[in-house]
Image: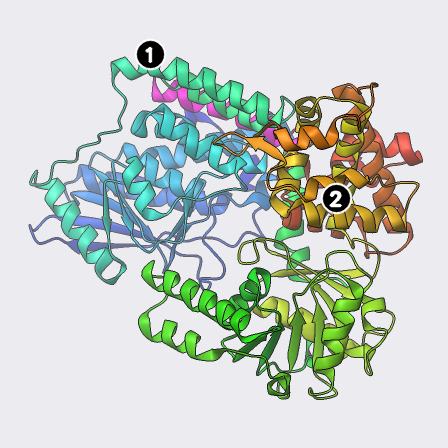
Amino acid sequence: MTNYAEVDFSPILADTDDEVITHSPVRDIRLASGKVLALITLDNGRDHTRPNTLGPATLQELNNTLDALKVRAAAGEINAVAVTGKQYILAAGADLSDISKVGSRDNAKMVAQFGHHVLGKLGDLGVPSFAFINGLALGGGLEIALNSTYRTVDASAAAIALPEVFLGIIPGWGGAYLLPNLIGIENALEVVISNPLKQNRMLKPQQAFEYGITDAIFPAANYLENSLSWADGVLAGKIKVERKNEPGKIERLTKWPIAIKMARGMLESKIGTVPKSPYAALELLEKAKSGTKAEGFAREDDALADLVVGDQFAASMYAFDLVQKRAKRPVGAPDKSLAKKITKVGVIGAGLMASQFALLFVRRLQVPVIITDLDQARVDKGVAYIHDEIGKLEAKGRLDSDSANKLRSLVSGTTDKSLYADCDFVIEAVFEEVGVKQQVFGEIEKFIADDAILATNTSSLSVEEIGSTLAHPERLVGFHFFNPVAVMPLIEIVKTPQTSDAALSTAFVTAKGLRKNAVLTADAPGFVVNRLLAKVMGEAARAVYEGTPLLTVEKAFAPIGLPMTPFQLIDLVGWKVAAHVQDTMAHAFPERFFASENFHKLAELSEVVDKDKAGRVTGWSKSAEKVLKGAVGSTPATEAEILRRVQDGLAQEIKIMLDDNVVAAVEDIDLCLILGAGWPFIDGGASPYLDREGASERVFGETFHTPMVKGIAHS
């Protein structure tokens, strides 16, 4: 085993000039029993919008702090050490920008070793160590806690997770060894592999406590005081810490191998065998059932080093950079000073989508929101839905009663369109037909001010055509949400040749106020996400009508890594919506998009596909089989043929979109697919994936990204 104390870490400490250092000041706290606890508070000196991160210089300072505390513990000056963070945040993990710059495998391994060297000291101070998880604890932040002897958590902490697999790496500072030995293999598989692959799902504090990641949970109001008192009780032997999920011999001998085998099978069926990080994590978890901590840490060192210099981590960093930087500074957004101030919002429609819009606008903007529909009964139903959803947020403790009552009072409904007169921003959520949208906008435009903004949520129709009958078409902008509205982070903002800078600026500022990421797109059929998903769904449908079995088609798409298979996705968005989008795309580009009348026949059925409890498609429903009988051919495609067709089709479509200036750059297409379609981080979005798979060169003889660095661009 490597003796970390003998490793020369100077190569990774040499270039830390740009690091925002998280400092580790210490203060002594005399507990009620008279014992002294040395409390480290991690703090980078920034406000809570810049979380603590753990770069090399930060780890070096923490290393020196822990060495000094070990000396004090040996001298009998302190009885315990605790680590907590600045307000709301323990730490958001390693500084990924540092890790992505390491260059060689040796340096990458050194990053893992340095983390183990420093954090491992929390278990070797000569006195018990406590982690007080007072807020966000991700990756290395959670591993600080796992390396400590005991852990408490603030019940209001934002999120707790080991998200590394989502980013194409593994928990490399103790997490892959310590966690399964703390909470058992099944829980560890959930935290380390399953959650990251579910669009990077995080744990709430209560879940972390129930898993056994933390030993105690306390409310925010007196969190530190309660944690100190609890630690005092533990030190005095008055509180006995029991860990019911800690694995015993029987679990290690029987349950462990079975859980690993089942997890491997699940991974292979859901994501294929191309992604490396889930399988590397699985191997580490499998081996964690036996051997020493030092052996476990050494395995993490090697696994992390291999992944950091691989192309999937480079792809993840490209995607991470898009989400962290490009998404926050949208390309093409006019100066925000041009935006109209929004003091009242109108929503045309009172159905489910419209009601979700109204709820989001009232929650985020906290301005009056008015909804309208054809009759009062529909309006009343929409308002009741919004009030009910506000009540659910109140019941969950996410809103206090005063805030909930205020939000309810801001929502109203009417059939009297003259009440829209003082709205600054009006968005429609009506039937996806140009004529219907033109009609409702024409009715509203008679009442609103000349500079009020109109927004259409169309998913694929021409925004310019929708606005062609308006007196002021320059006020119209596309404002395309994704379902579910509250969750999906993307809004495609669509500009027509007539759209004014004031309307466009208002749209971008409003999107930011709604806490969404906006990407500017030209007024082209399907815009970005639906255009490319229509290609995916169309190729799936084409294969079915050739005579390919449904499950063969579903399986063919697994290597792409989308969170849903094509027919799962169609079933979620709705067969009528999918049929409409396919028609729009096939009408616009008949030579490149597949559509079939059978889509519409299937859309009329109550059930089209059968699914298991996990939501996986298992086959056609009996009624769908009747529709398809005689409609499918007898020349089934293989999985490889289907995958190649969809890869080449996507590469072709993205190249055409770039040539036609649908977006400013390929990075915007990747950003849209990551935020709006859940395209995996470990692929880096669609274009790097298509480059690596050779589709770009097959289709147009070049790659989307140059220069290529291990199969991925850093444009």
Q: Main secondary structure of the magenta part?
A: helix
Against 532, residue 102 (above or below) is above
Q: Is residue 475 left or right of residue 591?
A: left
Against 566, residue 254 (above or below) is above
Three-letter code for the amino acid on which mark 1 is drawn = Thr
Q: How many marks?
A: 2
- Gap between marks 2 and 1, in whole Å? 51 Å
Residue in view at x 66 percent, y 35 percent: 567
Q: Label 2 belongs to which residue?
A: 600
Rendered location of residue 75, percent (x, y): 16, 40
Q: Is residue 649 left or right of residue 154?
A: right
Residue in view at x 33 percent, y 56 percent: 156
Comparing 226 with 210, the one in front is: 210
Three-letter code for the amino acid on which mark 2 is drawn = His
Q: Label 1 belongs to which residue?
A: 254
Q: Is residue 301 magenta?
A: yes
Quarter of the image holding residue 420?
A: bottom right
Helix, strand or loop at mark 1:
helix
Q: Is residue 130 left or right of residue 462?
A: left
Q: Could you classify mark 2 by the number of other residues whose Cα lies within 10 Å: few (under 14), some (14-19), or many (20 or more)?
A: some
Q: Which residues are magenta?
A: 290-312
Is residue 334 in view? no
Rendered location of residue 175, percent (x, y): 41, 32
Residue in view at x 20 percent, y 51 percent: 227
Comparing 623 with 265, the one in front is: 623
Is residue 273 in view? yes
